[in-house]
């Protein structure tokens, strides 16, 4: 009784001025070289499937080059896997400063939203209990931290999870100092 009725969705209207296909299945033909989102062909590994899109192996893409390369490599070989660094060596009168990241505030966009920014912590220096005792500082006191010749005043916080001679400062906060971490730094008490 309903055998003559179609249950298929109608085809979306085509746009003659668009290079894209208005279909649920996608474009079945070869896309213009500037619009190739990925190299894939049935039965080919992804690296090898690029050959299906080139006029010849290692040659230009069908339809020509999609653009101009704006940044040229500097030349030389990249040394990705050099020698492993030596063991950690403590320095007298200095701490090894590492970055600390927070869910709220450590990435560039979250502090632009007032509700999220209100949950971000202020700048601080996290120390373990042994380092706090050795430096004779208490939680909440303000100290001066110098890294690479640049000093900043930070409030001290206890971080029991940190090992001895290692301190942490949050990164990404608008008020945080800009240092290249990890690095060695010197902590000095602020005189009252």
Image: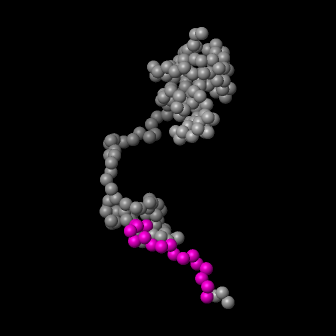
Q: Nearer the viewer, residue 137 or 4?
A: 4
Please identify the quarter of the rendering in which residue 157 is found: top right
Q: Position of residue 107 (x, y in %)?
A: 54, 39
Q: Visible in this render: residue 54?
A: no
Outermost residue toward the top in this view: 192
Residue 110: % across, % down = 56, 40
- What's the residue at 48%, 28% (across, down)? 179
Of helix, strand and loop, which mostly describes the magenta segment?
A: loop
Occupied quadrant, residue 166:
top right
Give the vertical position of 51 relative to 28 (above or below).
above
Is 17 contained in the magenta span? yes
Compared with 170, 94 (above or below) is: above
Quadrant location of the N terminus?
Answer: bottom right
Question: Is residue 78 positioned above or below 58 on the image?
Answer: above
Magenta stretch bounds: 4-20
The x and y percentages for residue 76 are 33, 41
Residue 3 appears in the picture as rendered: yes
Q: Which image quadrant is residue 61 in?
A: bottom left
């Amino acid at each position: 009784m309903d055998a003559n009725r179609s249950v298929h969705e109608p085809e979306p209207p085509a746009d003659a001025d668009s290079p894209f296909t208005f279909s649920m299945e996608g474009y079945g033909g070869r896309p213009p070289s500037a619009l190739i989102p990925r190299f894939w062909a049935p039965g080919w590994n992804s690296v090898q499937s690029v050959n299906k899109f080139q006029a010849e192996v290692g040659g230009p893409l069908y339809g020509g080059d999609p653009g101009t390369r704006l940044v040229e490599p500097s030349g030389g070989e990249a040394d990705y896997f050099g020698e492993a660094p030596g063991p950690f060596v403590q320095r007298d009168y200095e701490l090894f400063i590492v970055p600390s990241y927070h869910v709220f505030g450590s990435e560039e966009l979250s502090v632009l939203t007032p509700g999220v920014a209100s949950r971000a912590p202020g700048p601080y220096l996290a120390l373990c209990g042994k380092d706090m005792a050795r430096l004779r500082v208490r939680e909440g006191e303000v100290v001066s931290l110098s890294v690479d010749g640049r000093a900043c005043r930070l409030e001290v916080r206890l971080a029991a999870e940190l090992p001895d001679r290692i301190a942490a400062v949050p990164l990404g906060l608008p008020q945080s100092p800009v240092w290249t971490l990890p690095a060695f730094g010197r902590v000095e008490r602020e005189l009252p």
